[in-house]
Image (spheres, helix red, strand yellow):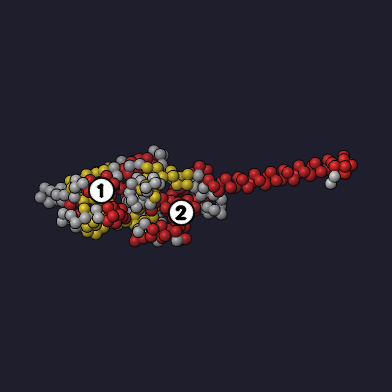
């Protein structure tokens, strides 16, 4: 249309054209805003119903925040540890990443000493604790297994892996250790607050002839292994996946060797506060979803932990 013909357009036609332009422009703006909002939500990890099929199972408060705070001792390879770049990697972070696709939230791992994780959960520092934590009745009930006294509120566990406890020594220097009974009169390094520490305390009471187990408890398992390498301990005890990984990787496989068989196989569980039943059930649903779709098995095979795979996640399966 030329400038001349535009000027000949009637006033009525001009008004109609203006209104039409406004309507079209408004529609474009609204369409654009809708697309941008959708993109923003998906990029934030909150996901849509299609992208995160189990999002509606989460408590609204967590779903709105888009984050689950995870208390974890990030020094327990291969379950959770930091790689050479400082990135948190391992079985638990990989499982959490797979679960996040089901739930539409980010699992944010926050480092803490293992023996303080349940305290942090009770004080609302964390939403959950996921750290190769053995599900047992003592933790479910908040009981110290050594003194049998109440130490705090118990927790519920969402179980996801089975693992026993192992002993390892310096390679070629087993000191005659093949069973827990052989630790009597020996020096054992463990991580504080673990089942290994509980087992060592129980075994020490059985030692004959006034002997005992000289136990050294550390904040993390890496410190216990350092003590073993230096000759300050005769052995370390840790969960089998951790012991096997250390034997395979430390010093190129030249530092340690496993002795004897793993004992007391029990489930690992994600710890959740007793009152957080909706969160607990959402986590269980997410775990069962990744078990069924095959992601779970691939993750365990990646880290050499497939022997501990479970067919279904259960609540409080530990004894």
Query: Where residue 237 appears, x then y in whole percent?
Result: 25, 51
Of 29 and 53, the residue lying toward us: 29
Give the side of residue 163 with respect to residue 281, left or right. Answer: left
- Residue at the image point whose x is 42% and y is 53% from the top: 95
- Residue at the image point whose x is 47% and y is 51% from the top: 100
Helix or strand or loop: what does disc 2 sit on? helix
Residue lying furthest left = 209
Q: Answer few, some or many: residues within 10 Å of disc 1's Cα (few below 14, many 20 plus, some between 14 and 19).
A: many
In the rendered image, which quarter is residue 116 located in?
Answer: top left
Query: Where residue 143 appears, x then y in whole percent?
Result: 30, 45
Give the side of residue 199 with respect to residue 272, left or right. Answer: left
Which of discs 1 and 2 lies nearer the camera? The answer is 1
In the rendered image, which quarter is residue 72 located in?
Answer: top left
- Write down the residue under mark 2: 98
Of 57 and 252, the residue lying toward us: 252
Query: Where residue 135 appears, x then y in whole percent?
Result: 34, 51
Helix or strand or loop: what does disc 1 sit on? helix
Q: Is residue 119 above or below residue 266?
A: above
Query: Where residue 195 appears, x then y in whole percent?
Result: 28, 49
- Sequence-wise first label, 1 or 2: 2
In this orientation, does residue 264 appear? no
Looking at the rendered image, the quarter that the C terminus falls into is: bottom left
Query: Are discs 1 and 2 less than 8 Å apart at CB?
Result: no
| Label 1 – label 2 distance at C-alpha | 31 Å
Give the side of residue 304 with respect to residue 52, left or right. Answer: left
Give the side of residue 220 with respect to residue 37, left or right. Answer: left
- Write down the residue under mark 1: 225
């Amino acid at each position: 249309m030329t400038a001349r013909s535009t000027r000949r357009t009637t006033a009525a036609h001009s008004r109609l054209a203006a209104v039409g332009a406004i309507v079209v422009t408004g529609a474009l703006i609204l369409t654009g805003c809708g697309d941008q909002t959708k993109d923003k939500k998906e990029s934030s990890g909150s996901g849509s119903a299609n992208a995160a099929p189990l999002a509606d199972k989460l408590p609204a408060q967590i779903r709105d925040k888009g984050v689950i705070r995870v208390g974890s001792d990030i020094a327990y390879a291969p379950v959770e540890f930091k790689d050479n770049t400082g990135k948190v990697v391992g079985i638990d972070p990989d499982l959490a990443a797979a679960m996040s696709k089901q739930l539409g939230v980010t699992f944010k791992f926050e480092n803490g000493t293992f023996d303080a994780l349940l305290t942090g959960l009770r004080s609302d520092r964390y939403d959950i604790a996921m750290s190769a934590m053995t599900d047992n009745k003592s933790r479910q009930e908040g009981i110290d297994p050594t003194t049998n006294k109440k130490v705090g509120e118990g927790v519920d566990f969402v179980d996801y892996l089975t693992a026993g406890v192992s002993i390892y020594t310096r390679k070629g220097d087993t000191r005659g250790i093949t069973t827990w009974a052989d630790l009597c009169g020996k020096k054992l390094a463990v991580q504080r607050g673990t089942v290994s520490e509980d087992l060592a305390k129980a075994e020490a009471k059985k030692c004959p002839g006034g002997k005992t187990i000289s136990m050294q408890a550390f904040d993390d398992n890496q410190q216990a292994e350092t003590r073993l390498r230096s000759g300050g301990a005769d052995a370390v005890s840790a969960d089998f996946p951790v012991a096997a990984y250390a034997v395979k990787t430390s010093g190129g496989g030249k530092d340690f060797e496993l002795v004897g068989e793993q004992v007391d196989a029990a489930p690992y569980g994600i710890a959740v506060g007793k009152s957080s039943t909706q969160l607990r059930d959402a986590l269980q649903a997410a775990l069962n979803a990744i078990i069924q779709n095959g992601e779970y098995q691939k993750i365990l095979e990646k880290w050499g932990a497939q022997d501990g795979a479970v067919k279904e996640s259960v609540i409080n399966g530990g004894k």
